[in-house]
Image (tube, rainbow, N blue to C red):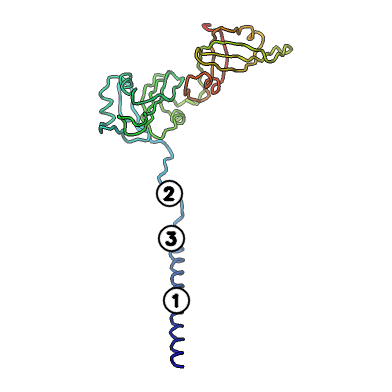
Amino acid sequence: MKKSKKKDKKLTFILIAIVIFLVGFILGLVLERCVFHKDVKEDDSNKIIISEPIVKEYMSFVNNKVYLYNLNEVKFKDNTTLKDFISNYKDIDNLFTDLDKHIKEIKKLYDGGTTIYEVKDNDDLFNDKLTIIKCNTEAGNRDIYFAQNINTTEAFKNGACGKENYQNSKTFTKDYTIDKIEVLEEDKENDKYTLELTISDGKNKTTIKRVVDKQSKDILKEGEKYTFHFENKYKELITDDIEYIFSNFTLKGVVPYGK
């Protein structure tokens, strides 16, 4: 009988100890969250977020400037610095003549000739896959940008190559031959004609539809060359491909070639 009471007391003590431990553990968690972390809120304040591109003037070259865009330095396989590399050249043309085998052209702008390049895959000169912008604007900007993680359209809107007014529409012209003219609809009452024009650049062709008046219709002749006026709505010219140009730019007018 005494042994049974001792066992019951021992079991009761163990259960009480377990309850005290659990209560203490739970209370500790509550205090840790509510007291010690009372003023701490989960946010992104400790995360590294690049909200704006980091652009810095790196050096002067001839009468132009070289900029680094989201870069501290350009890394070469032989550990040469970009400054040492560029200093070997007397002008931009010589520099890009030697860079030609290491880079590939990916975009060109109708702004005077600004060209955007990328470093080729597995290149033996550059350590990193970079974007290089060779500015050549009608306003005379000849700066060079070596960049990583760059949205070139946004870069131009933010002033790269001196393009603070890049969002303004620009116009340009291309010379094409009209191979074929087909009248799809006639609205003689309103002097309107819907034409399907087959246009050639000498290598490739595209077909467009155009609503014109009778005077314009009579000017257009099959087999003749014309100057096409386009408006550039903030877009970069990625290629001279005739289909791309007619798809991405607004055709404002057509005049006989040479007039």
In the rendered view, tell whether residue 160 sits above or below residue 191: below
User: Can you say whether 68 is above or below 209 in the image?
Assistant: below
Which numbered disc flags the more N-terminal residue, 1 or 2? 1
Distance of label 1 from label 2 (alpha carbons): 41 Å
Q: Pointers 1 and 3 in contact (CB under 8 A)?
A: no
Q: What mark, if any, has residue 45 been given in the picture?
A: 2
| Nearer-N-terminus badge (1/3) | 1
Q: Tell me which amino acid carries mark 2.
A: Ser
Query: Foreground mark, 1 or 3?
Result: 1
Expressed as whole percent of the image width and height from the top left, the position of residue 109 reads 45, 22
- The kind of secondary structure element at disc 2 is loop
Q: Position of residue 127 (x, y in %)?
A: 31, 34
In the figure, residue 13 lies in which quadrant?
bottom left
Q: Between residues 133 and 205, which one lies in front from this camera angle?
A: 205
| Mark 1 surroundings within 10 Å by alpha-carbon count, few (fewer than 14), some (14 through 19), many (20 or more) | few
Q: In the picture provided, is 210 more to the left or to the right than 108?
A: right
> Is residue 150 rendered to the left or right of residue 195?
left
Residue type at mark 1 is Ile
**Among numbered discs 3 and 2, the one appearing first in the sequence:** 3
- Mark on residue 18? 1
Q: Measured from the top left, where is residue 189 in percent x and y?
A: 74, 12
In front: mark 1 or mark 2? 1
Q: Nearer the viewer, residue 203 or 140?
A: 203
Q: Secondary structure at mark 3?
A: loop
Badge 2, how many Cα within 10 Å: few under 14, some, many 20+?
Answer: few
Where disc 1 sits, the SS reads helix
Q: Is residue 6 above or below residue 35?
A: below
Q: In the picture shown, does residue 46 fall above or below 93?
A: below
Residue named by callout 3: 37
